[in-house]
Image (spheres, rainbow, N blue to C red):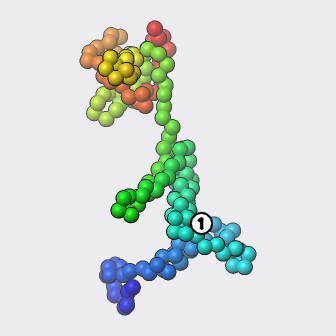
C-alpha cells in the first residue's frame, strides 16, 4: 500500500484489494443507474465467490462490446485456466462467416492480403485426393479469358456470384 503521496505519474503506487472492490462497485453502479439509485436496504447483499465475480466481469465485457459494435452479432467470452493456476480471458465480437459459394462459376472476390488480388475469378470446387477435403480454386479473368496460375480462394473472401457465369 502507498504510504505517502509522491508525484510521479503513479509510479510506486499500489491498490489494496479493498480499494479494487470499491472501484469495481463504483463502475457497476455507473453502468447500472437503477441499482445506484436504490437504497442499500432494497438490494439483497449476496456474497459472490471469486469465480462468480470473474464470470460476471466477463459477462459485463461481452455486453459492453456488443453495444460498442452493433454490426457484429457474435459475442464470445471465455476464461481459460492454466496448469500453473493462472488464467487468461478472451472476449471478442465478430461477424458470422460468409459462405457465398454456390457451385462453379464467376465470382467477385475481395483481396486476401498478399495472396491474391481483388477481382473476378472463375472458381471451382476441387476435392483433394489425399485428405478428401474440398478446396476452392480460382482462375483470374482477364480480357474475358481465364489466366494461370490458379489461386486457392478462401471462402470468406467471396463477395457475390456474378450472373451468367454458372456452368
Splitting the image into 4 quarters, where does residue 44 fall? bottom right
Image location (x, y in percent) of residue 2: 38, 86
Residue at 56 percent across and 74 percent down: it is 26
From the viewer's side, name the closer residue of 68 and 101: 101
Please report the residue visible at 46 percent of the width from the left and 8 percent of the height from the top.
167
Q: In which quadrant of the rendered view does residue 16 lie?
A: bottom left
- Residue closer to the observer: 20 or 46: 46
> Callout 1 environment at 10 Å: few (<14), some (14 to 19), or many (20+)?
few
Q: Is residue 79 above or below residue 21?
A: above
**Total number of numbered labels?**
1
Q: Residue at x 53, y 60 (%)?
A: 55
The residue furthest right is 42
Q: Residue at x 32, y 17 (%)?
A: 129
Point out residue 118 in the picture as x, y percentages from the top left corner.
35, 27
- Establish if 56 lies above or below 27: above
Q: Residue furthest left?
A: 149
Element carrying mark 1? helix
Q: Residue furthest front?
A: 83
In which quadrant is the N terminus drawn?
A: bottom left
Q: Give coordinates of residue 9: x percent, y percent.
A: 34, 78
Residue on which disc 1 sits:
31
Q: In screen coordinates, is 47 left or right of 146?
A: right
Q: Is residue 57 left or right of residue 80?
A: right
Comparing 112 with 15, the one in front is 15
Amino acid at each position: 500500500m502507498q504510504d505517502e503521496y509522491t508525484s510521479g505519474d503513479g509510479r510506486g503506487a499500489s491498490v489494496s484489494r479493498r480499494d479494487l472492490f470499491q472501484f469495481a462497485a463504483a463502475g457497476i453502479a455507473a453502468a447500472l443507474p437503477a441499482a445506484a439509485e436504490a437504497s442499500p436496504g432494497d438490494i439483497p447483499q449476496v456474497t459472490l465467490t471469486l469465480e462468480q465475480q470473474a464470470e460476471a466481469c466477463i459477462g459485463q465485457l461481452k455486453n459492453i462490446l456488443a453495444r460498442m459494435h452493433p454490426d457484429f452479432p457474435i459475442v464470445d467470452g471465455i476464461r481459460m485456466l492454466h496448469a500453473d493456476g493462472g488464467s487468461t480471458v478472451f472476449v471478442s465480437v465478430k461477424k458470422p462467416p460468409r459462405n457465398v459459394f454456390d457451385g462453379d462459376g464467376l465470382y467477385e472476390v475481395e483481396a486476401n492480403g498478399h495472396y491474391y488480388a481483388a477481382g473476378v475469378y472463375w472458381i471451382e470446387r476441387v476435392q483433394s485426393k489425399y485428405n478428401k477435403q474440398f478446396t476452392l480454386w480460382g482462375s483470374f479473368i482477364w480480357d474475358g479469358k481465364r489466366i494461370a496460375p490458379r489461386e486457392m480462394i478462401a471462402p470468406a473472401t467471396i463477395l457475390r456470384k456474378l450472373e451468367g457465369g454458372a456452368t
